[in-house]
Image (cartoon, grey):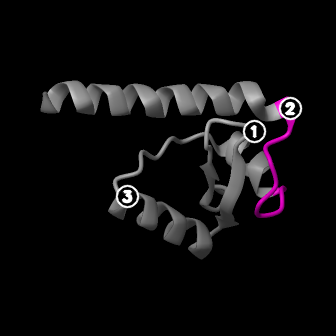
């Protein structure tokens, strides 16, 4: 079975309501999303199934309830990385 094409999704979470999809794509678009995230120092978490599910949503859509647990795990992972970086700088 051939490898699935690269895919990526980016979320915005302000702390109220559900996170929103701000970018999603496959192939070249996914590579651009990932490169932009890395350039900006945004942590990149790999979860192909979640990326596929998020890519089905329209840009600006809130993450639906059935994906909240998976997205919460990713956000917790990102917050933990941020906390570690803050402690390292102190």
Q: CA distance from mark 2 to mark 3?
A: 28 Å
Please tell me the numbered disc located at residue 18: 1
Q: Give x and y (percent) for residue 5.
A: 64, 62
Q: CA distance from mark 3 to mark 1?
A: 24 Å
Question: Which residue ends up furthest to the left in the rendered image?
Answer: 90
Q: Is residue 1 visible?
A: no
**Residue interval drawn in magenta:** 56-66
Task: Judge by depth and name the residue closer to the eye, 38 or 52.
Answer: 38
Q: Is residue 24 above or below residue 49?
A: below
Q: Is label 2 in a helix, a strand or a loop?
A: helix
Q: Is label 2 in contact with label 3 (beta carbons under 8 Å)? A: no
Which residue lies under the disc numbered 3?
Answer: 38
Q: Residue at x 69, y 36 (%)?
A: 16
> In this rendering, which labeled residue sits more in front, label 2 or label 3?
2
Query: Which comes before the other along the chain, label 2 or label 3?
Result: 3
Q: Is label 1 in a helix, a strand or a loop?
A: loop
Q: Is residue 61 visible?
A: yes
Which residue lies under the disc numbered 2?
Answer: 65
Q: Residue at x 65, y 28 (%)?
A: 72
Q: Give x and y (percent) for residue 24.
A: 68, 62
Q: Is label 3 in a helix, a strand or a loop?
A: helix
Q: Is label 1 in contact with label 2 (beta carbons under 8 Å)? A: yes
Q: Is residue 79 above or below residue 33?
A: above
């Amino acid at each position: 079975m051939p490898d699935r094409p690269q895919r990526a999704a980016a979320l915005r979470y302000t702390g109220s309501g559900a996170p929103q999809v701000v970018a999603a794509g496959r192939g070249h678009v996914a590579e651009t999303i990932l490169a932009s995230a890395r350039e900006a120092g945004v942590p990149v978490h790999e979860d192909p199934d979640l990326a596929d599910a998020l890519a089905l949503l329209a840009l600006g859509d809130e993450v639906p309830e059935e994906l909240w647990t998976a997205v919460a795990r990713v956000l917790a992972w990102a917050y933990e990385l941020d906390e570690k970086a803050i402690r390292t700088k102190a």
